[in-house]
Amino acid sequence: ISVDALKPSDTFPRRHNSATPDEQAQMANYCGFDNLNTLIDSTVPKSIRLDSMKFSGIFDEGLTESQMIEHMSDLASKNKVFKSFIGMGYYNTHVPPVILRNIMENPAWYTQYTPYQAEISQGRLESLLNYQTVITDLTGLPMSNASLLDEGTAAAEAMAMCNNILKGKKKTFVIASNCHPQTIDVCKTRADGFDLKVVTVDIKDVDYSSGDVCGVLVQYPGTEGEVLDYGEFVKNAHANGVKVVMATDLLALTMLKPPGEFGADIVVGSGQRFGVPMGYGGPHAAFLATSQEYKRMMPGRIIGVSVDSSGKQALRMAMQTREQHIRRDKATSNICTAQALLANMTAMYAVYHGPEGLKSIAQRVHGLAGVFALGLKKLGTAQVQDLPFFDTVKVTCSDATAIFDVAAKKEINLRLVDSNTITVAFDETTTLDDVDKLFEVFASGKPVQFTAESLAPEFNNAIPSSLTRESPYLTHPIFNMYHTEHELLRYIHKLQNKDLSLCHSMIPLGSCTMKLNATTEMMPVTWPSFTNMHPFAPVEQAQGYQEMFTNLGELLCTITGFDSFSLQPNAGAAGEYAGLMVIRAYHMSRGDHHRNVCIIPVSAHGTNPASAAMCGMKIVAVGTDAKGNINIEELRNAAEANKDNLAALMVTYPSTHGVYEEGIDEICNIIHENGGQVYMDGANMNAQVGLTSPGFIGADVCHLNLHKTFCIPHGGGGPGMGPIGVKQHLAPFLPSHPVIPTGGIPEPEQTSPLGTISAAPWGSALILPISYTYIAMMGSGGLTDASKIAILNANYMAKRLESHYPVLFRGVNGTVAHEFIIDLRGFKNTAGIEPEDVAKRLMDYGFHGPTMSWPVPGTLMIEPTESESKAELDRFCDALISIREEISQIEKGNADPNNNVLKGAPHPPSLLMADTWKKPYSREYAAFPAPWLRSSKFWPTTGRVDNVYGDRNLVCTLQPANEEQAAAAVSA
Amino acid sequence: STVLEGLKYANSHEWVKHEGSVATIGITAHAQDHLGEVVFVELPEDNTSVSKEKSFGAVESVKATSEILSPISGEIIEVNKKLTESPGLINSSPYEDGWMIKVKPSSPAELESLMGPKEYTKFCEEEDAAH
C-alpha cells in the first residue's frame, strides 16, 4: 500500500468544495476553456493576481476534521470558566436544552437567509413576531424591531433617533453615569459622526438649561444595580422637550414597572439572559422599542402582519425598502443583518417559560440577591447600598481588591468598580451554595454563622410597591401553551417545517455567499468552555479564546494582505462604519480635519453611503459605464475636484455587478494621489481569497463578512461578523474597549484608538471558531480552490442560462466573477412578468429565489458558491429554463398575462387542495412542474404575501387570539 | 403615462400647477408608476419653506423610498394631510387628489426653467430607453 493511502482519510476541502477534478474539467470545457486554470487566468486580471498564498505553521496544509476538533478541544481547555457575578449586561443563563439542540445546533434554523421571501419563511417570521411581542409586552411600548446587534449599538441607534426626532436642531445627548461603560463609549464614538456632543453626568446633575439637548439616556436598573423611580425624571425631560431613552433588562421587567409606564420614548436592551449564552460577548439579540409616533424612524428589520393572496393572515418583513434603499447620504443608520437566530432563541425561551415561569426565575434571582445583601449586613464586614435593587448588589468595603482576589481564588469573578466598591450580579444559574461561597469571600476569614438557606425566610422584597409591575405581559396563547418539552419540541419543528433552508436546496443569493456551514465548524460554538465565558472576565482566564484571536488575526492578515485586524465589529455594516472611522481618525491625526469627502460608485450597496453619512462624510457619487465598470474618468475628475478634502473611496471588488474590473489598480492610485484612502467592501471576498487580495490591489482598509466568505451561517438574518483589516499606517486607530482594552491583531507599535464600535471587546466572539476552523481545515490550497470553484460554478451556470436569459455584464474575456446577473426587464413588456413573479415561481420548484432587483432593477443576481454540486447547479438551471418556457407560453398568447402559473405562484397546499380550482392551468402542473419534485417537495405555506396591505396597515406584534380566530372564520 | 397640459415638470418627476399666487406640487403619473403602490408619504410641516431642487418629503412604496424635490422655492401654505391616511391617492390620482403641497412661490421665474408637457413626455421616453 502507498504511504499516501495511509494518510488521514477525513480531509475537509473535498467535503466543502463540490466539484471533483473531472467535473472541474468538464465544466471548464463547457464554458469554452481547456481547464479550470485557464478559465481563472482569463477572468482575474493579471495585474492583480497573486502568485500564491501561504499560511504559517500547521495551517498551510489544512487540518483534518478530527485534528481540528482536537485542536479546538485544546483551546477550549485553555479557557478557565469561573462563576461570573460581573453582570454589566451579560448574565449566565440556562439555555433550555430543547432550544440548544433544536435551534442553536440545528441547520434548519441557522442556515436560512433573511426572510425576504416571506412565503417560505413563515416559521421564523412567526418566531420573530413572538420576539417583538416579548419586547413590546415587557417594555410597555407598542413597537419593537426584530433585533439589533448589541445593547451598546442599540443605545447609539436610539441616540440617532432622538437627533432625528428633533430634526438635528439640538446637538447634545446626555447620558446618565449609571449606564454600562461600554454603552457610554459606543454612544460617544457614534455621536462624533453626527456632530452630537455627549455629556455624561450623574443622574442628579442632569441639566437641560442649555436648551440644546435632544435626548437623555438612563439605565433601569442601573449598572451598579440601583432601581430608581424615573417618573419625575421623565416628566422633567419632556417638559424641556427632551426625549428619554431607557436601557433596561428584560428579566427585571417581569417584576418592575415597565419603562413605557414612566413615559420613556425609546427603550433598549439585550435579550441575552433569556436563554442565549454569554459567549465571551456575543452574539445576542438586542432590542429597541418605541411609540407608534416614531415607528417609521425605528432602525433595523421589522416583522409585520399582512395577508396572502387568499386573504389569510401571513407575515413578512415590513417597510423593507427603507433598508434596501437606505436613504444614502441622508441615512442615520446602516444596520442590515441583525441577530435573528438569537432573537429566535430569546423568543423561544419566553415561549417555554411563559409569563409565570419568567417571573419565578426573576423572583428567584431577586431572592438570592436579597439573601446575599442580608447576609452581608449581618457579617458587618462591608456596607450594602441602601437603594432598591433587582439582581445586582453594590458593596462598599475598605479593600475591594483584596476581596476580588479572594473570590478569584475560589474561581469566582466579581465586578471591581473601584478600590472600595464591588458589585455582585446574580442570575438564573446562581445557587444557594454560590451565595454561601460569597459569604465566605466577604467574611475575610471570619466564621460565617448562617447560611443562605437559613436567611431565606428573613428576606421579603427589595422593590418598593411604587416600582412593582402590575400590568400583565405575555398573555397571548403562544406564551401559555408550550411549557412542556414535547410541546415546545413540536412547536419548534412546526415552525421550522415552514422555512426553506440550506437543508433543502441551494440558496443562490447574489452578494450573500450562502455556502456550506460545516458541522465541524459549528461544533465548538456550543462547547461550555466557549459559551460560558463572560466578556469582561480577566483575559488570563480566556487564553483559549485569545490564542484563537491571535491565530485568526494572522490568518486573515495573510488572506487579505493587511497588517492588522480588529475583531470587534459584529456585522458587515458595523465593519464598514468602523473602517471609515479608522480613516477619519487617521486624517485627523495628521491635522487633516477637513478631509470629509467620500467617493462612492452608484452601484455600491446602500449601506456604503449610509456608513459614510454616519461618519459625517460628504458623499460624491460616481457613475458606471455601459459595461457596469466604474467610470474611471468620472472618478478621476471627482477625486481631483475634491483633492483637498478627499477622505476615501468605497469600492466593492469584484464589482457589485459580478465583474473583475480591469482598472481597479488604477482606481486605487487615483485616490491615493489625491490624498484619499481606499476602503474596500469585502462583500465579494469569496472571489478573491488566494487569487488576489485587498491589500495587494491597493486598499488601505477592508471589512470581511465572516458570515459570507468565512462560513458563519446566516441564521435567518444574523448573526454576522464584520472584522476589519488595515494597512500598517491605519493600525493604531483600530477600536478599543473601555472595560477590556483591545486593538489590532497583530498588535501595532503605537495605539490611538478611534473609540468603541461594539458593546463587547471582540464582538461576537462565540462564532469566531466557525471562520477559524473553516480556514484552518481548508488550508491555503483548499481556500484558493474554493475561490476558483466559486468562479467556475458561476460561469457554468451563466453558460447554461445565457441562451434563455440575457446575462448582463462580463469581464474582458467574456467570463463572469463568482456571481452574475440575468436580465428580466424585457419580460415586463412581452409577458407582464417581473422578477418577483420568477422568484415566487421558483418556490414551487423548491428553490429560494436569487437576489432580486439589485444592483440593477428588474434583474436577478445569482451566486452559487463553491459548495454546490454540479447536480444542484443543474437542477437550479433546469428550474429557471423551465420557467423561461412558462414565460414564453404567455408571450405566445397560450397563457393569460394576468392569470398564469407565474402570477399565481407560489401555490401552497391550502390553495391546491381547495374544493374549487378556478385557475386556467392544472393543479398538478402548478405543484409538480419538474420531475425531482415527485420524490421530495418543499411546500410553501402561504400564497403570495401582500406587501402593500401590510405596509399601509402596520401591525408588528401578535394579534389577540380572538381576532385571529375571527379573521380565520371570515376567510374560511 | 399621462402627462397633463398646463403643468410644468421637473426632471426629478414632480409637477407644478401655477394658479394665481399659489403653486400646487405633486409627483407625476410616470413617477408613481415607476415607484409602484405607495404605502407612506412623509410630508413637511406647515409654514416652512422649500427651495428649488431640495427635498421636502419622501414617498415610500414597497419597491423604493424616494426623496421628493421641490421644483420651485417658496413658502408652504398647505400640506395634503389626506396622504397620511390614504397614501394610495398618489397612485390613483397623481395630478388631483394626490397633490402634496401648495406653495407661495418666492421667485416665479424658476417656473420658466421647468419642462412643458411635450418636453417632459420626451424626457420620460428617453429615460426609459436608457435603462
Image: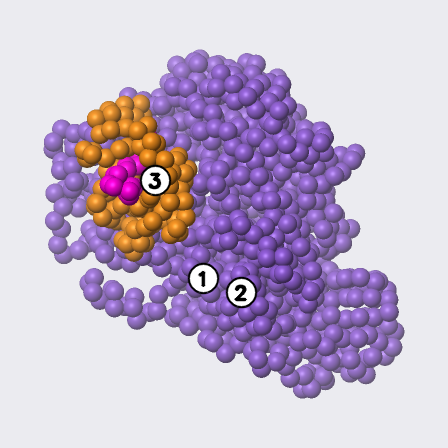
Chain colours: A purple, B orange
Residue A128, by quadrant, is bottom left
Q: Chain of mark 1?
A: A
- The magenta segment is B11-25
Report the number of numbered marks. Answer: 3
Classify the position of the N terminus of chain A by image quarter: top right
Q: Is residue A461 above or below residue A627?
A: below
Q: Is residue A615 above or below residue A439?
A: above
| Residue A291 disc label | 1
Disc 2 crowd rating (10 Å Cα; few below 14, some 14-19, many 20+) is some
Residue A45 as seen in the image, left or right of residue A510: right
Residue A397 as seen in the image, left or right of residue A678: right
Do discs 1 and 2 belong to a common subunit?
A: yes
> Label 1 to label 3, Cα distance in Å?
37 Å
Q: In the rendered image, is residue A846 in sight? A: no
> Label 3 to label 2, Cα distance in Å?
37 Å
Taking the spot 44% from the left edge, 14% from the top edge, the residue there is A812
Do discs 1 and 3 belong to a common subunit?
A: no
Magenta residues: mostly which secondary structure? strand
Q: Please check the rendered image and state whether residue A457 is part of the magenta-colored stretch, yes or no.
A: no
| Residue type at numbered disc 3 | Pro
